[in-house]
Amino acid sequence: MTDRLYRVYISVAPAPGEPRVETLLPALLKLGIVPVWPERRLGWGERKSLIDGCDYLMLFSGHTYIARPPSGVSWQHRELNHAVIRRIPVFSGLLADEMLDTSVQDEVMARLLSFRSQFEGRTSMVWSERKDIPSLLKSTWPVFIKRYPASGWVRAGSVSAVPVFEEKTQDAPAPVIQPDTRREDEESIDMDLEGWLYTQELFSFRCHIYIGGNCQVVEQNLPLTWADVCEAFVTQISPKASEDRIMRELSELLEERFTESTLAHYTQAHAAADFAFTETSMRKIRLKLRRSGLIRKDTHASTRHSQVWIITPAGKRLSSLSENLAD
């Protein structure tokens, strides 16, 4: 039994012969895993939200690749790519090569092999029969979490583990930060609001493009107005919001604006997904909004790995102006 509990998104293919979460529950719970998995009817937005709330993604790939129209990309493929772009550690359990069903259609096998190739050199576990998975997890999971530590939760009654939230609240002493947050609250915006909102600037972002089942990460620089950025960032804070939630809104903004142009640029690609600002652009956005007195960090709610932002009175005025201009 471990001292911590970890929230883990379990990714499996909904097909006969594939691992089932329900049958693995006893083994997962014994390992300190709080399993999270989607209902079949859930769309991509809900799946992303579940993954974002987890410490790890645990993916079991068997003999099947279930492509979803119209992109031809499976849920598992998108779940993997989303976890990678959000830097969530991925524990992969793959069916042994010699156990793959070679009688499936060539196209399905090609996409499955392309998907499995993303784990080359970093497969966490290989299984031959589903009944072997619990015992293999027992030996491989502790090694994995030691190599990729996450915060998780302290198990009740544990005396050897240091509470996670006590560790995190010591990042920045309140007496040092409090004067800055007061200035941000009281700061007025001395600028031409309408002119600033409609100033265009280049932002860099990444996305995944799919070509014949193969996934490739591409990076682009394209213009956005600060009104676009503020609508996706500032207007989501009421009165506070985690950066993870804000990042989802920014991702949807990029996907809506640039999917068409990305596919036009990469003519061989049949799908583009998982848009996200690069860290360079995110730093630029945070710095601009903080220096303008529109947002401030909630130092009590923020942690080493997750930031929470509060909208200031100036930010509320700017948000109202942005909405009025949009109308």
Image (cartoon, helix red, strand yellow):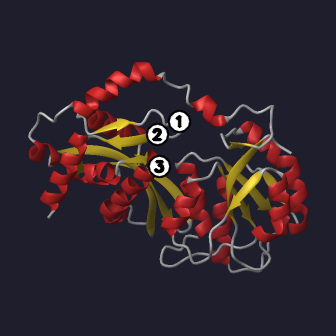
Position in image of residue 143 (x %, y %):
81, 41
Q: Amino acid at mark 2?
A: Gln
Ranked by sequence position, the earlier of labels 1 and 3 is 3
| Along the line of sight, the residue nearer the viewer: 82 or 38 | 38
Q: Nearer the viewer, mark 1 or mark 3?
A: 1
Q: Amino acid at mark 3?
A: Asp
Q: Quadrant of the C terminus?
A: bottom left
Question: Is label 2 in a helix, a strand or a loop?
Answer: loop
Viewer can see residue 276? no
Per the image, the residue denoted by label 3 is 244
Per the image, the residue denoted by label 2 is 307
Per the image, the residue denoted by label 1 is 303
Please say if the residues under marks 1 and 3 sit with CB atoms less than 8 Å apart. no
Please say if the residues under marks 2 and 1 sit with CB atoms less than 8 Å apart. yes
Q: In the displayed structure, would residue 319 be above or below residue 257? A: above
Ranked by sequence position, the earlier of labels 2 and 3 is 3
Q: Quadrant of residue 259?
A: bottom left
Question: Is label 3 in a helix, a strand or a loop?
Answer: helix
Which residue is drawn at the image coordinates 37% and 53% (left, top)? 250
